[in-house]
């Protein structure tokens, strides 16, 4: 029977630098999980006592009674009649689910071991298990469990302990324990050992029986959440004639992320989507039916290995099948009064109307073109943007009379500033129709921003001069060092930056700026080299 000698056990105990808490991660690299590399459920079946574990998986002796004695174990789906022990079933509630009972030895002994290959060096992994103290009486000695990670040659790398498993009454209580650890460089194979320890005071007897189930090992990594803007939860209903974008939020963990989107018809069988390797994905306007999507994330170079990547939440997208619309044309005479279109909408001016009835799936089902006989509609064009200082001319067409939003009656209108402009026209038959257009103004001149200056006092290029900012008195300018430290900020730019931070000259190097013109045109950002 393999046990651990005093020197190795002492080194393991010294290495325990933090508490092995139930389901608790230790960094952003432990907030997401991938597909388990293995999950030891011990199976399920009808007999209360199952067959022993395969050779080489445990150093304990298999008990045929289901009530193991010291240095023995049993695989059962139910405990009953064992003196001093709780009655217990599988932690999932499955009446046929097996779990492992261990009667701890006086010395630390490996009661479960497994070798894992094909891992990615530098990635983070997690091993977890559900464990319960089976002792039904308050003992003086409480069992605890070590999870020990060894290199392929058997040398020690890391370990964690559950610490003492408390006695719980009136029933045993399953708890999940998880251990996260990074894999060292150059390592792709490890040996996992699960070891008992109840030897606080060997002469004291009490609790030493415990149960363990669902020993799980797999990759860990950053949190990864996918969603569609405007939808809450993991179900998205998309109109059949529209596309959407599934975006992702991934925590910081890997030096450089690599992505792969997957699709499934049933949330069980998954396939990579060819070419879908960005942080967002659009299913496209022609995809109909119910589909499931998820995102794989890994350190760059490892995305192809299932042993080295984590998985986002699953998103179900429901999209109705596109049915081509039916068309019909109607003609009616109107100049004044009201006309009711097929959708129920009422109109009171003449013109051509396209009336659409929307189907339950969001698709056009009936499109009706209604020609009301006699009034032409003015056309001021589409909403548009002009540059500050420019003008635009609005011409609605040829009619008998015109009336603009300001009361003017000219056939054309000269626009010199942004705003909402409208015209009402009257044709030769006396029918009146109107049109409206929105004109926006924008500052169209590109602002040249120097990418270097030399504040050395020679009177040449001593400041980071941006003359055009004088036209934006409410703009904000912020400058940061390469480490993210704020070294300069101002509202407006009344005085050009001279390469100092509160009067102290900054060293030569690359600094980063963000400029907000406060005119809804977006942020200006980049870098500037300070050269002395």
Image: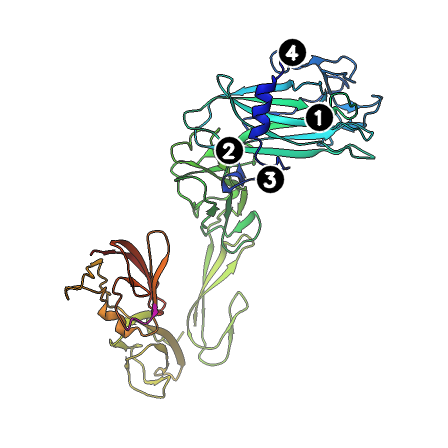
> In the figure, residue 520 lies in which quadrant?
bottom left
Please name the residue that numbered disc 1 is placed on.
200
Q: Which mark lies nearer to you, 2 or 4? A: 4
Q: Residue 279: within the magenta?
A: no
Please name the residue that numbered disc 2 is placed on.
270
Please name the residue that numbered disc 3 is placed on.
24
Q: CA distance from mark 1 to mark 4?
A: 21 Å
Query: Which class describes the residues within 10 Å of circle 2: few (<14), some (14-19), or many (20+)?
Result: some
Q: Which mark lies nearer to you, 3 or 1? A: 1
Image coords of residue 272 (percent x, y) = 45, 34
State the extent of the magenta-drawn residues as a range: 490-494
- Residue at 36% over, 86% down: 406
Q: Quadrant of the C terminus?
A: bottom left
Q: Earlier in the sequence, mark 2 or mark 1?
A: 1
Q: Nearer the viewer, residue 78 or 206?
A: 206
Q: Earlier in the sequence, mark 3 or mark 2?
A: 3
Q: Nearer the viewer, residue 125 or 396?
A: 125
Q: Earlier in the sequence, mark 2 or mark 4?
A: 4
Q: CA distance from mark 3 to mark 4?
A: 33 Å
Left or right placement of residue 74 versus residue 278 in this view: right
Please name the residue that numbered disc 4 is placed on.
1
Q: Is the Cβ of the residue at disc 2 closer than 8 Å to that at disc 4?
A: no
Left or right placement of residue 458 versus residue 360 in this view: left
């Amino acid at each position: 029977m393999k046990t651990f000698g005093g020197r190795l056990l002492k080194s393991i105990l010294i290495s325990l630098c933090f508490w092995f808490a139930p389901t608790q991660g230790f960094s952003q690299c432990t907030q997401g999980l991938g597909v388990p590399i293995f999950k030891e459920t011990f199976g399920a079946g009808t007999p209360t006592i199952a067959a022993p574990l395969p050779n080489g998986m445990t150093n304990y002796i298999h008990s045929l009674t289901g009530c193991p004695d010291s240095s023995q174990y049993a695989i059962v789906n139910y405990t009953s009649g064992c003196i001093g022990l709780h009655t217990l079933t599988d932690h999932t509630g499955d009446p046929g689910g097996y779990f492992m009972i261990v009667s701890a030895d006086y010395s630390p002994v490996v009661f479960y071991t497994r070798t894992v290959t094909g891992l990615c060096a530098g990635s983070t992994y997690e091993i977890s298990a559900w464990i319960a103290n089976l002792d039904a009486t308050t003992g003086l000695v409480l069992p605890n469990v070590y999870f020990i990670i060894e290199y392929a040659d058997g040398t020690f790398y890391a370990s964690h302990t559950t610490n003492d498993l408390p006695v719980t009454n009136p029933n045993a209580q399953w708890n999940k324990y998880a251990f996260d650890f990074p894999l060292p460089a150059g390592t792709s194979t490890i040996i996992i050992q699960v070891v008992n320890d109840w030897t606080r005071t060997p002469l004291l007897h009490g609790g030493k029986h415990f149960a363990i189930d669902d020993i799980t090992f797999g990759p860990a990594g950053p949190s990864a959440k996918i969603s569609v803007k405007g939808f809450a939860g993991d179900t998205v209903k998309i109109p059949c004639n529209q596309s959407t974008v599934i975006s992702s939020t991934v925590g910081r963990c890997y030096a450089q992320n690599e992505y792969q989107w997957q699709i499934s018809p049933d949330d069980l069988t998954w396939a990579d989507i060819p070419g879908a390797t960005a942080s967002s994905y659009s299913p496209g306007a022609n995809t109909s039916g119910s589909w499931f999507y998820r995102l794989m994330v890994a350190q760059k170079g490892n995305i192809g290995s299932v042993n080295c990547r984590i998985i986002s939440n699953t998103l179900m997208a429901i999209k109705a099948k596109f049915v081509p619309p039916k068309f019909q044309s109607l003609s009616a005479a109107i100049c004044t009064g009201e006309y009711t279109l097929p959708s129920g909408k009422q109109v009171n001016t003449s013109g051509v109307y396209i009336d659409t009835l929307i189907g339950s799936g969001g698709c056009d089902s009936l499109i009706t073109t209604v020609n009301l006989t006699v009034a032409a509609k003015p056309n001021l064009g589409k909403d548009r943007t002009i540059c500050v200082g420019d003008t635009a001319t609005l011409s609605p067409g040829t009619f008998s009379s015109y009336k603009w939003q300001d009361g003017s009656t000219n056939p054309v209108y000269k626009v010199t500033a942004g705003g909402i402009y409208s015209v009402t026209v009257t044709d030769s038959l006396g029918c009146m129709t109107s049109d409206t257009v929105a004109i926006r103004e924008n500052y169209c001149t590109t602002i040249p921003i120097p990418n270097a200056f030399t504040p050395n006092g020679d009177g040449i290029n001593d400041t980071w001069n941006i003359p055009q900012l004088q036209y934006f008195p409410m703009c904000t300018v912020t400058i940061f060092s390469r480490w993210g430290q704020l070294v300069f900020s101002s509202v407006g730019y009344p005085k050009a930056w001279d390469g100092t931070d509160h009067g102290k000259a900054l060293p030569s190097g690359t600094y980063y700026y963000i400029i907000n013109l406060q005119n809804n045109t977006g942020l200006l950002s980049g870098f500037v080299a300070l050269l002395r």
